[in-house]
Image (spheres, rainbow, N blue to C red):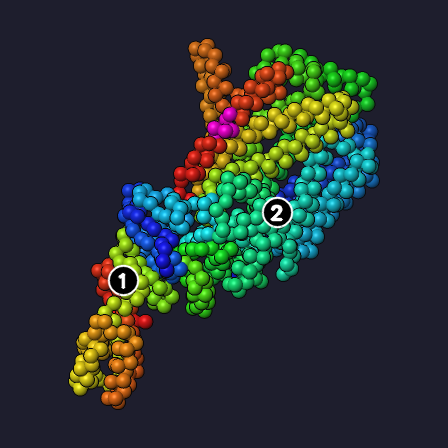
Amino acid sequence: MSSVVVKASGLVKSFNGMRALDGMDLEVPQGSLYALVGANGAGKTTFFSIVGGFLRPTGGSVEVLGHTAPEGGALRGRLGMLPQDAAFLAGVPVLEQLVFCARLQGFDASGAHAAALQALDSVGLADVAQRNPRALSHGMLKRVALCQAFLGNPEIVFLDEPTAGLDPETARRVRALVREWGGKRTVVISSHNLAELQDLCTHVAILHRGRILSAGSMEDIAFAGCHYRCAFDGAVDEPMLLALRSLAEVASADVVAGELQIRTAAGVARNDAAAAILRCLLALGRPPRKFVEGVSLEHRFLEAIGGQSDGLGGS
Amino acid sequence: MLTNETQRRPGGLTALAVLNFVFAGFNLLGLLALAVGLVVLATVDAAKLDEARQQMDEAMGEAGVAAIAVQIGLGLVALVLQVFSAIGYLRMAPILGRMTGNAFAVVSIAGVFAGAAMGMPFSIGSVVSLIYPLLTLLLLNFTFRGDFLRGQVVPIPVPVADTTVVVAGTLQQDLAATAALRRDLVMHFGWRHALRGGGAVLYLLSLLGGGLMIAAAFISPVETLLASDKPGAAARAEEMLHSGMVVDAIGWVTGADAATSAYFVKEQPALQSAILLMLLASMPFFACLAGFNQTAGEIGTKGLRFLLLRTDRSSLFLGRFLAALLFASVGVVVLVAVTIIYLAARLDLYAFTDLLLWGAQGTLALWLVLLPHLALTAWVSAALESPMGSFSLCSAVVGLPIALLKGIVFALRKIQDIDLAWTDRLLPWGWKYDLLDPSLANRAVAAAVMVGFTVLFLWLGRRTFLRRDV
């Protein structure tokens, strides 16, 4: 993860005087699975649309793989994207449309056909290759659009709400695909499902009203000042708290909203802290019913935008 | 999951089904009229209706009652097949749709030729009635063939022969060279999609149907005159076509001087000149049909975003324009070819080579008129997000300035006696007849103006498309 593959500097986009992006700065490291989180209207889709060349920025610049003001012509085959709300042509079989996309990326005719079929197969839709897009369900269309984004093995892929509106099984399948693909290239994902992003991504940026409030590795954001949250059968008693507080790896141990919350001491490795805490609890004969590490991304997100969290959540 | 046919059916197939129902209604009316004629011929005392019978005999040519009965029989079979095939198209059923549709087309074509063989008059109207079944055959067996094959894997047609191969992810080569390839790919895909989407089907039917009706309006009176058994009919037809009245009429329509009008009438096949001049005047409006949805629909659905990730906007804009130009041009060539073949085969007035040469010049002129108007529709289509809005605006942009200029010129001439006829030249419309002018220099100037307007509109359209949010 050495070089930066996406760099936005002071990016501004206005719609009729309203600023959807208001001086956004962002750097996406190569090979990362990067989460872009934000409330509705924060500017996530606008940012993706500028990167894809669909919208023209009002100010600032964005550089993708070394190209400023990116356009398909310059980045074809190197940048893939799942755009939000984009519809395939009605009346033209999905395979034909994917073949056309692959041909535009530079594949020859037979290569394009093979790549399109392979992409459809990877999302389990080889059997609908000849179907008109209008005959496909929302979930199927999402998967077709997703395989379109990964068609031809691009270097960087942007996924705008890849699991929105999908049933749990399809969403799980999409997450598995993204995880599999993400290990091989840079993937930037926007989603409102923060638990999903925390589970998938290596990096995260919090976008609020067109500006990045916080950005970094998931480790830094979600595990900063690492917390553990424990639940037990029965109440947390004073001897347990004292025993935990006496551990060198523990900075504090308190009961918050009926749960035991433990903050680790600075400089202690997460695994060492977890092992020490669990050993202590087992020695006391109080194995936890629930043991959750870290702070949820949702908590960090709400903290960053000044909202309210109903707890610490966790991963 | 939505699996009903409405969701799967291409727009072009729906259009074909709707047209089948509409034409079936017209055919039914025609058959009823024919049946009434048959009853009259068979039952009414000839002595009492001599004049009417004579007129009917003329209309029916050499056909007897039996021939008309055969026509009605074939017409009924075609009608039933037409209605059932329309239902089959809507259901995308292989037998009820494609097979029945093919049967309808074959029976319709056979009906026209059988009628001619049995002595029924073969007129330009017969040619018009051949267009739809022929188009049906082409569409069912090429464009929509795969849509009727339930569950079978159909090989995907390859849009363009293999040329440059650039392995995705390693592109840092000559982008200009590959931009041309991408433009060609967009053009080929656009052409195919226009047929499947229904836009090109409607354009081709409108152009061929409308164009041949224009031709029929000129040909039919001459044909009737030639069909009469009166001696010297051909000479009288020729005399009528070369008359001062026709020359004046051409001059009035085209605004040309007497010498130019006489050139159209006396030095070129007059009938063909009249058809070509009328087609030149209609072409801007046919161009609206061909070009209104080059990009507007997919800007609205954001479908262009899938393509913008892979190609530059210029290639997309120009590729779509070329696709529209391609199918619009095919329609023009077919239309002119049909009129040439008909005039040569049916009317013994002109030499085939004369018709061919004048037809070729006419085709070029029509194509040159098509160019700026298609470019104008490309600009409008790039500016809007709705196909219907684009069609309305294209029609308005093509028609309103012409109507306004004509109105202003007419009013000023009436009120102040100021001749502002030159203002016609501000639009491509004002140059269209010069494309067939006897002077080659005038033709070259008009062609240059058409190309100039095309370049201007394409430049404006491309600029709009490059700058807009998609």
Tag 1: Cα neighbours inside 10 Å, few (<14), some, or many (≥20)? many
In the picture, the disc for residue A301 is 1
Residue B75 screen position, x and y as percent: 73, 43
- Kindly indicate the quadrant of the structure image that contains residue A214: bottom left
Q: Is residue B69 left or right of residue A213?
A: right
Residue A291 against residue B460 in the figure, above or below: below
* Dot 1: chain letter: A
The chief SS type of the magenta part is helix
For badge 1, the amino acid type reads Phe
Please name the residue that numbered disc 2 is placed on: B162
SS class, disc 2: loop
Viewer-nearest residue: B6 or A151: A151
Residue type at the position of mark 2: Asp
Measured as percent of width and height from the top left, residue A203 is found at 33, 62
Answer whether residue B456 is magenta in the image: yes
Q: Is residue A287 left or right of residue B100?
A: left
Observer-side mark, 1 or 2, equals 2
Within 10 Å of disc 2 (Cα), the crowding (few <14, some 14-19, many 20+) is few
Task: Give the residues drawn in magenta, as a range.
Answer: B452-457
Q: Residue at x 60, y 37 (%)?
A: B326
Vertical order, A100 against B384 (above or below): below
Measured as percent of width and height from the top left, residue B354 is found at 73, 22
Chain identifier of the residue bearing label 2 in the image: B
Residue B370 visible to the viewer: yes
Q: CA distance from mark 1 to mark 2?
A: 50 Å
Say if the magenta span includes residue B163.
no
Q: Nearer the viewer, residue A207 or B147?
A: A207
